[in-house]
Image: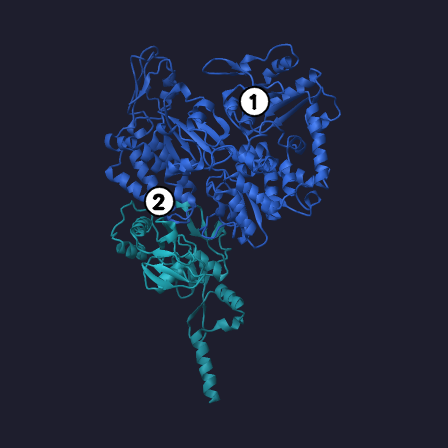
């Protein structure tokens, strides 16, 4: 149906909420990228098939629950639940049971539980690694219980491809509120909420909108940056895939406030599912009269187009992104005149990140006071992080700003794999820095992270333990940026070339005292001289590891030693004859045939053949731990 | 409007960029991607200057003067320690990129660098990726060359291996504007070769001078709104004819 007025939309929302409340049980199977890769769609198919066979009354879309009377099981896929490591995930409401690592063969047992024939299979439930206690639902599991979700609120709860489901779960309350306000009033609310850009820079969203509101030129553009390119980051992806309507509602509110008629969502080409779901959402919204011409009979028109990136990291930079949408080479320009004055096609442009847009509807719905009461004074609200690396619970987490690194890594993340010692956490993607153990109690907010040599960035969080070499980490990011620098300006292009050369020297044990001086000189020139913030921040991984892990750098240079056992040129693998049982596992795995030894006799590595790939070290069973790095 | 440049208060015109003020004052700073005929892009970063304002309470920042518009009360230093150190490092790195580019050698020397402290690029050419050639070609109206690839792989090239089917008209504007002489071209009595493309040359029937490539002459005639016939003779021949007519009149 096409909504002709706000009243019609409100009436429809009430109907949909009533239908939702009539559902007996809601079963959602995670269809986020991680769970799909782990086979969740097969689980979904098996579930619907077996439920039908067991004579359950089921619906796979909200609308067909309408004519039933409270005995329907509503089964649908959902966006990412966040606990990707435990996928495929299957959630049953209102019972609050979260089944993990579900396989098609487990479906029978789950149905038996639904029938009340047996308690939930504990093998599919979460077991607290510390206490061994079984925790059946999100309210109990530490990973979820300690989070607070705003941007990710709907992810994992609603069907991302159903507008009805979105409307039944609070969707478009934000826009309804916004339509009763003037542009200035909306900008005031956003400003007072303290919302800051979630894409990295942390600029006040309200102030940005204010400048665009005051800009005289027409037309004005509203853009969404979905070009998430940091290694290991997938917050925006999960939001676009799991709750596309919310991003579009946020953009529509922004467009209404600025009286913009044209919007673009720039999505990187590596996110085909996000593109598909966003496009489907746009089509649905246009059909419903919530996008396109004369939205809700207000006379206000707003059209959104998806613009697909070509995979260049630099196109996540605002001015490069705009050039890319224009069809030009994705290179940044100097921002002495800001994009809110002269952006896309030289017109006033508001560009916000996916997560920022996703916060907007709830701020309008619940008021600025509600948002500002969360987080810290200067960084309000919550922030989503993708927690990855050597941490027990990897996945997507959202916490109030000001939560400490320790709480995120140890309470939510469950600590380090194998309970090895924590070494560092890398925040902010390639432009961020590595923070050491003594800073674990830092509150995570925009200003604190920047003051300590790292940054919030878009929210990547990579945890490292004693087996990570900090010089090697610095080299990894320098290499990443070397390949992704656009090459327009000298400091970034030539600086990264030289930085990569110099850092590689260190990892190969060829560095000397002058090397670090030269590295710092290059970093300095890049920081001061680069055109865009990508170049200015590119030396951060090097500078922050030099600041907090200088000892380790010096060990590489002076002692020619890599204590973490990572830098190949500086290590040798050795089999401890006292520990080796001669199980042959390493010998079979070695690609070079460098391991000599018979069954049940200690093995030995032939140094002439060994190319230090470390496979023997990885495959040697932990109970033996016979392969050592020296 | 007034600004303070290296300690001296001077009058400037609203809308102009710092670099033109600096040059007008006779202060020499390198600005290798700057060309008066085209819009600035701020790629070489050598024209950086340090700016501050009294209300910034000691805080300052580096900006590229070719792109930074003058502002009332701005305090600008073109050779502060921060500027000179950064500029020297950039020149050092450019010298490692293009050790044979004379203009880089000259400026590096000015900043105390005889030989680069970095390893020299393998197969180094003279291109510093200043982008002047690309912008000039666009201004000519041909869009025949572009920066392709990214990062250290970046090169200026004719696009997409189109073979002979190129927008290039062999006018040499790019080669003449190049500050380092990086664009190679050659000419014999009948042909001109640039960007791997060979053009025939049209000559003046009167003086025998080279007029250009036919594609170039077509383009310029069209662009200037002149008859193509105008370009079938050299300037010298035109002058000669006019002089003859003039002699007849008097």
Residue B144 percent coordinates (x, y): 48, 56
The kind of secondary structure element at disc 1 is loop
Mark-to-mark CA distance, 2 and 1: 45 Å
Report whether A5 appears left or right of B241.
right
Residue A448 percent coordinates (x, y): 41, 35
Question: Residue A56 lies in what quarter of the image?
Answer: top right
Marked residue chain, label 1: A
* Residue at image coords 50%, 40%: A197
Report whether A286 appears left or right of A268.
right
Residue tagged by mark 1?
A89
Residue tagged by mark 2?
A495
Figure check: A561 above or below B24: above
- Which chain corresponds to the colour blue? A
Q: How crowded is mark 1: few (under 14 residues within 10 Å), some or many (20 or more)?
A: many
Figure check: A549 above or below A45: below
By what rule are the colours in the image chosen?
by chain
């Amino acid at each position: 149906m096409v909504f002709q007025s706000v009243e019609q939309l409100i009436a429809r929302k009430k109907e949909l909420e009533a239908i939702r409340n009539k559902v007996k049980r809601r079963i959602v199977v995670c269809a986020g990228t991680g769970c799909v890769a782990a086979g969740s769609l097969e689980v979904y198919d098996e579930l619907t098939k077996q439920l039908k066979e067991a004579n359950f009354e089921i619906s796979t879309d909200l609308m067909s629950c309408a004519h039933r009377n409270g005995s329907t099981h509503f089964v649908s896929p959902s966006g990412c639940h966040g606990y990707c490591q435990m996928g495929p995930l299957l959630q049953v409401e209102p019972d609050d049971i979260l089944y993990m690592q579900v396989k098609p063969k487990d479906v029978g047992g789950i149905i038996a539980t639904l029938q009340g024939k047996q308690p939930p299979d504990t093998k599919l439930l979460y077991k607290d690694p510390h206490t061994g206690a079984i925790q059946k639902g999100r309210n109990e599991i530490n990973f979820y219980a300690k989070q607070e979700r705003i941007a990710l609120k709907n992810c994992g709860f609603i069907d991302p491809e159903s507008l009805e489901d979105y409307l039944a779960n609070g969707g478009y309350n934000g826009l309804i509120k916004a339509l009763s306000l003037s542009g200035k009033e909306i900008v005031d609310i956003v400003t007072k909420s303290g919302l800051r850009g979630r894409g990295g820079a942390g600029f006040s969203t309200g102030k940005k909108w204010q400048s665009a509101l005051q800009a005289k030129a027409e037309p004005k553009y509203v853009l969404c940056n979905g070009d998430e390119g940091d290694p290991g980051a997938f917050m925006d992806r999960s939001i676009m895939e799991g709750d596309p309507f919310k991003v579009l509602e946020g953009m529509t509110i922004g467009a209404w406030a600025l009286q913009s008629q044209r919007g673009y969502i720039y999505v990187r080409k590596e996110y085909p599912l996000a593109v598909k779901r966003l496009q489907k959402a746009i089509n649905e919204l246009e059909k419903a009269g919530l996008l396109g011409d004369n939205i809700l009979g207000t006379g206000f028109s707003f059209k959104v187009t998806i613009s697909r990136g070509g995979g260049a990291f630099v196109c996540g930079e605002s001015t490069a992104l705009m050039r890319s949408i224009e069809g030009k080479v994705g290179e940044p320009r100097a921002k002495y005149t800001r994009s809110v004055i002269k952006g896309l096609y030289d017109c006033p442009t508001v560009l916000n990140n996916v997560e920022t847009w996703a916060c907007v509807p709830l701020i309008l719905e619940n008021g600025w006071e509600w948002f500002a009461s969360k987080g810290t004074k200067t960084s309000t609200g919550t922030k989503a992080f993708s927690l990855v690396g050597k941490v027990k619970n990897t996945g997507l987490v959202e916490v109030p700003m000001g939560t400490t690194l320790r709480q995120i890594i140890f309470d939510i993340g469950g600590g380090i794999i194998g309970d090895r010692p924590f070494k560092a956490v890398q925040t902010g993607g390639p432009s961020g820095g590595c923070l050491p153990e003594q800073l674990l109690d830092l509150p995570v907010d925009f200003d604190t992270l920047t003051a300590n040599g790292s940054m919030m960035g878009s929210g990547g969080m990579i945890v490292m333990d004693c087996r990570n070499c900090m010089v090697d980490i610095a080299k990894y990011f320098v290499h990443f940026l070397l390949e992704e620098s656009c090459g327009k300006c000298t400091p970034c292009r030539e600086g990264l070339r030289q930085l990569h050369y110099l850092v590689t020297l260190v990892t190969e044990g060829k560095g000397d005292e002058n090397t670090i001086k030269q590295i710092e000189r290059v970093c300095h020139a890049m920081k001061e001289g680069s055109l865009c913030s990508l170049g200015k921040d590119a030396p951060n991984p090097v500078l922050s590891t030099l600041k907090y892990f200088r000892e380790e750098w010096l060990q590489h240079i002076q002692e020619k030693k890599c204590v973490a056992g990572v830098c190949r040129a500086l290590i040798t693998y050795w089999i401890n004859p006292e520990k080796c049982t001669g199980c042959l596992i390493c010998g079979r795995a070695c690609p070079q045939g460098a391991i000599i030894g018979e069954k049940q006799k200690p093995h030995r590595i032939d140094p002439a053949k060994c190319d230090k790939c470390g496979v023997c070290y990885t495959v040697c069973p932990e109970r033996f731990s016979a392969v050592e790095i020296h | 409007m007034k600004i303070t440049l290296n300690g001296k208060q001077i009058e400037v015109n609203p809308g102009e960029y710092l670099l033109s003020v600096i040059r007008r004052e006779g202060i020499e700073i390198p600005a290798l991607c700057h060309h008066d005929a085209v819009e600035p892009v701020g790629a070489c970063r050598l024209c950086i200057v340090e700016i501050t304002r009294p209300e910034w309470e000691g805080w300052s920042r580096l900006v590229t003067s070719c792109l930074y518009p003058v502002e009332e009360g701005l305090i600008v230093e073109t050779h502060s320690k921060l500027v000179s150190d950064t500029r020297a490092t950039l020149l050092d790195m450019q010298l490692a990129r293009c050790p044979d580019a004379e203009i880089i050698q000259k400026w590096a020397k000015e900043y105390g660098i005889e030989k680069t402290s970095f390893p020299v690029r393998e197969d180094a050419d003279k291109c510093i990726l200043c982008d002047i050639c690309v912008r000039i070609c666009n201004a000519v109206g041909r869009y025949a060359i572009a920066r392709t690839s990214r990062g250290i792989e970046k090169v200026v090239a004719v696009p997409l291996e189109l073979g002979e089917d190129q927008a290039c008209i062999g006018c040499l504007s790019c080669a003449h504007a190049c500050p380092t002489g990086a664009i190679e071209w050659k000419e014999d009595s009948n042909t001109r070769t640039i960007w791997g493309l060979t053009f025939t040359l049209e000559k003046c029937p009167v003086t025998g001078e080279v007029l250009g490539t036919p594609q170039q002459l077509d383009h310029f005639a069209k662009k200037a709104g002149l008859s193509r016939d105008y370009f079938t003779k050299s300037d010298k021949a035109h002058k000669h004819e006019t002089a003859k007519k003039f002699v007849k009149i008097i």
